[in-house]
Image: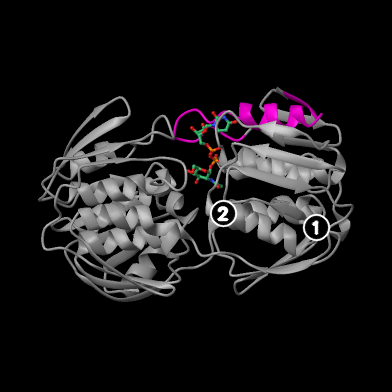
Amino acid sequence: MEDYIVFGKHPLDGKLKVYGAKNAVLPILAGSVLSGGVVLLKNCPRLSDVSYTLDILDRLGCKTAFDGDEIIINPAGVCSRPVAAGGGDMRSSVNFLGALLGRFGEAELPMPGGCRLGRRPIDIHVRALRTMGVKVETAGGMIYAKGWPKAADVYLDFPSVGATENVILAAVTAPGITVLNNAAREPEIGDLCRFLRAMGAKIRGEGGDMIRIEGVERLDGCEYTVMPDRIVAATYMCAVMTAGGRLEIENAVRPHLEETAAVLSRCGGEISWAPDRVTVRAPGLIVPCGTVRTGVYPGFPTDCQSQVMAVMACGPGPSVMIENIFESRFNIVPELRRMGADIRISGREAVVRGGNLHGAELRAADLRGGAALVVAALGAEGESRVSGIEYIARGYRDLAGELRQAGARIETVPTKG
Ligand code: UD1
């Protein structure tokens, strides 16, 4: 086990390139079990969640290989088996539900583990699949689903990202036309649809709230390049805001980052766009940015909430963060307080005052919260130790190494004792 030692107040100056998106590649990997041929995926990030998903594919009988940033999946030997428990709180194993139903008319997998963002129920997935004629039961920490998905008119009570992906995966080979209403609009859903279309699927309307899927008889192999990770790009943007200096971020897709960029510019950051890239110049002083509310896409993403709160805490404030998507996503608050921030929480709302943060011993408790602690430590006086960095590895290839390339002073050291 390792920790990061972060030395604050070293301005960044350089260029970083964003790699493929975790939240896009995970459902795409699950979707590859639907393929009748070999799938070649490019721009895949090396992350622990990706390795875990490849293990699931291997255990289902697929042959997988990860070379450079390319993954090859040969699903010729895939068979219907329970997805093994394990993989901790990796929620996206739930994507195998729709994919296995589409392939075998049955699926057995562990309930997505309780992660530390509050309850993470799957009732929306279950109701949607039942509308498609699938029998779904949950018992003893497992999900049991049986029956070939049938085309249907499906309505989601809330535009859940995972449920939208599961319905699409279940519907692409279901005879007839499935209409998915109140679908999530996150860009990663668009990536899944483009991937499935590359295999021969007939899908229209992704990016809007009504998606129309016409079932096809079979899907073929394909070659597909995964979209860049908008949350990684946003994390880099936050890192330069607190560390100071200037950072050019390549592979930044403007429409995906518009909300985060708007908030950071309200905090005083200077943001300039060019095709495929964004440059962020940090302000001398982070100024209060009013109230930021997380929302479904195209709203401000919950996955950037902790990193932006770390930015808020590096200025005097007050700024307000309201978390509307997850119940308990304020894991970093006690850590930021330990660095000298004054944060008052009432329900879903946090009022953040800060300014002269100092280094401290910090513990990551979730993926984005862990990255946010690095962001805060870059803006603090002196040295911070961040433990629990295995959470960060779920969604960042090598956060310390990448930020080092841009001038940050971060060391990776063995965990104490
Ligand atoms: C995905 C992302 C995650 C992101 C989230 C919201 C992946 C692998 N993960 O997670 O990084 O933070 O979208 O943008 O893509 N809910 C229910 N019942 C359900 C499903 C969801 O109540 O059946 C609730 C959840 O508890 C949560 C909210 O809906 O409060 C959003 O969840 P959802 O959109 O499903 O997120 P995920 O797909 O889990």
Magenta extent: 112-137
Quarter of the view holding residue 37: bottom right
In the image, is the residue at mark 2 within 8 Å of ligand 1 by its beta carbon? Answer: yes
Query: Looking at the picture, how far across and down is residue 56, in whole percent?
Result: 71, 50
Left or right of residue 194: residue 23: left
Residue shown at the point (29%, 49%) measured from the top left: 308
Tag 1 secondary structure: loop
Query: Looking at the picture, how far across and down is residue 283, in whole percent?
Result: 15, 63
The residue at which mark 1 appears reads as 62
Q: How is the image coloured?
A: one colour
Q: Is residue 115 magenta?
A: yes
Residue shown at the point (65%, 40%) measured from the top left: 94
Using the image, determine if residue 64 lies above or below residue 387: below
Tell me, yes or no, if residue 128 can be seen here: yes
> Mark 2 or 1, which is nearer the eye?
2
Near mark 2 (Cα within 10 A), the count class, few <14, some 14-19 or many ≥20, is many
Quarter of the view holding residue 274: bottom left
Using the image, determine if residue 309 lies above or below residue 64: above
Type of amino acid at the residue the image marks with label 2: Glu
* Gap in angstroms between the C-alphas marked 2 and 1: 24 Å
Question: From the image, which quarter does the N terminus lie in?
Answer: bottom left
Left or right of residue 250: residue 218: right
Q: Nearer the viewer, residue 55 or 222?
A: 222
Quarter of the view holding residue 247: bottom left
Residue shown at the point (29%, 65%) measured from the top left: 410
The residue at which mark 2 appears reads as 188
